[in-house]
Amino acid sequence: MGWITEDLIRRNAEHNDCVIFSLEELSLHQQEIERLEHIDKWCRDLKILYLQNNLIGKIENVSKLKKLEYLNLALNNIEKIENLEGCEELAKLDLTVNFIGELSSIKTLKHNIHLKELFLMGNPCAFFDHYREFVVATLPQLKWLDGKEIEPSERIKALQEYSVIEPQIREQEKDHCLKRAKLKEEAQRKHQEEDKNEDKRSNAGFDGRWYTDINATLSSLESKDHLQAPDTEEHNTKKLDDSEDDLEFWNKPCLFTPESRLETLRHMEKQRKNQEKLSERKKKVKPPRTLITEDGKALNVNEPKIDFSLKDNEKQIILDLAVYRYMDTSLINVDVQPTYVRVMIKGKPFQLVLPAEVKPDSSSAKRSQTTGHLVICMPKVGEVITGGQRAFISVKTTSDRSREHINTRSKHMEKLEVDPSKHSFPDVTNIVQEKKHTPRRRPEPKILPSEEDPTFEDNPEVPPLI
């Protein structure tokens, strides 16, 4: 059964920022509410109130809603119109498909002078003879009844016949009240029988059955180990019995009464609870997801189902995880291993096998403040690990290549063999030799051409050198 709680009202007051004291419109339809309460204390400013399709049996706790203009109580269990005198601004009242049999109870609506529309179709009183005339004559402020406008001539005629119509309505009310009293007694007796049957089932013997023959009981005890059916067969039998009971309940004819509505609701609740119990039995604890096999091989796992990208260059491997933007970083745990990386996101593992071996100590993890993405940078080591068997491939650098070149040259180089029997000691005295003094040579003077030289030609135009 549903109850009107503060949390329920706040959840249905999203259009008012979940503020209830200034709420003007509230919709609580199809909530299985059985009693109307608390609204007049928490929502004094209500103008529109929807309570249709519930299990409300009495109009109460609404007299303090002075500003209420429209009240919808269609499809409930109301049998009498009452406690609406305080709703001074009430202009529209919907009581469609209820169980109102006391038509004379509409006289309490005389104080609601602003009431213009009234809906009573689908109630037992709507099938009374002269029902419409009685309502029109009783409530002079009404303009519409059951969606049909009240004409002035219709009102005049109803007032003229009111003295004759009223006794007939009273008699029909009495007949209805007698029928309702019998139906209530029958429903109460049936409910008590069902409770007794439930108690018997709950207090049954060891195998759920009642025995009157002691010998039969003892024999069943002796043969219990041999004749006991497996759990699956018992479960299937119970399921079949429940389905048969459910089918029998829905096929059984019944009258449309408040008790039948409550009985239907109880049956649906019982079926739902049984279904929940069955689902709990079927529900097994999920085994933990395998991240590393028995032979030590890491597996690729993406339980959070998030997008990612992997960049592999010569120096490092970069993993970009599209972590949810508004997730708290404390819910993320990163573990970098030489051959794989594991990220726990809200307890769900994301694991990826790396294409090359990395250095966990030099790795770093950063999160973007704008997108929320997690970026993990993992520098490579000098070896690359491939999938399956571990095959080490050396990554050659320039220094490694030069060393290899020197080693190959040294292999082909001829080495002199020294006879160990012959030892030669160097002359220490001659290690540093004295420099001999050599006299400097004077440069030979250049011989200038003279006049005695046969090749010399004297040019008179050239001035002398000195």
Image (tube, grey):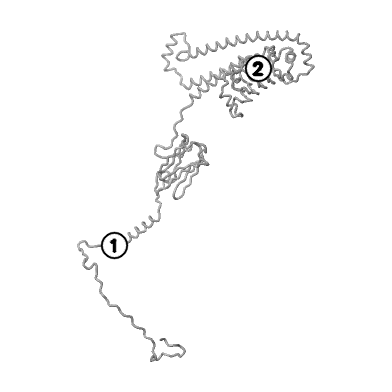
Q: Quadrant of the N terminus?
A: top right
Circle 2: element type: loop
For disc 2, the marked residue is 86
- Above or below: residue 206 compared with residue 371: above
Q: Are marks 1 and 2 in contact (CB under 8 Å)?
A: no
Q: State which quadrant residue 15 falls in.
A: top right
Name the residue type under label 1. Lys
Q: Which mark is residue 415?
A: 1
Q: Residue furthest front?
A: 466
In the rendered image, the residue lying farthest to the left is 421
Q: Quadrant of residue 145?
A: top right
Q: Nearer the viewer, residue 141 or 276?
A: 141
Between 36 and 306, the one lying in front of the other is 36
Is residue 150 among what the camera can see? yes
Name which residue type carries label 2. Answer: Gly
Q: Is residue 70 left or right of residue 414?
A: right
Measured along the vertical axis of the image, is residue 359 above or below residue 239?
below
Q: Helix, strand or loop at disc 1?
A: loop
Measuring 44% from the left and 8% from the top, which residue is drawn there?
214
Tell which circle, 1 or 2, labels the residue nearer the N-terminal end.
2
Expressed as whole percent of the image width and height from the top left, the position of residue 138 reads: 73, 13
Q: In screen coordinates, is 217 left or right of 60?
A: left
At a point 73% along the width and 9% down the height, the residue shown is 166
Residue 410 is situated, as x and y percent measured from the top left of the image, at 33, 60
Q: Nearer the viewer, residue 118 or 224?
A: 118
Q: Residues within 10 Å of mark 1 (few under 14, many from 20)?
A: few
Tell me if I can see residue 96 in this picture: no
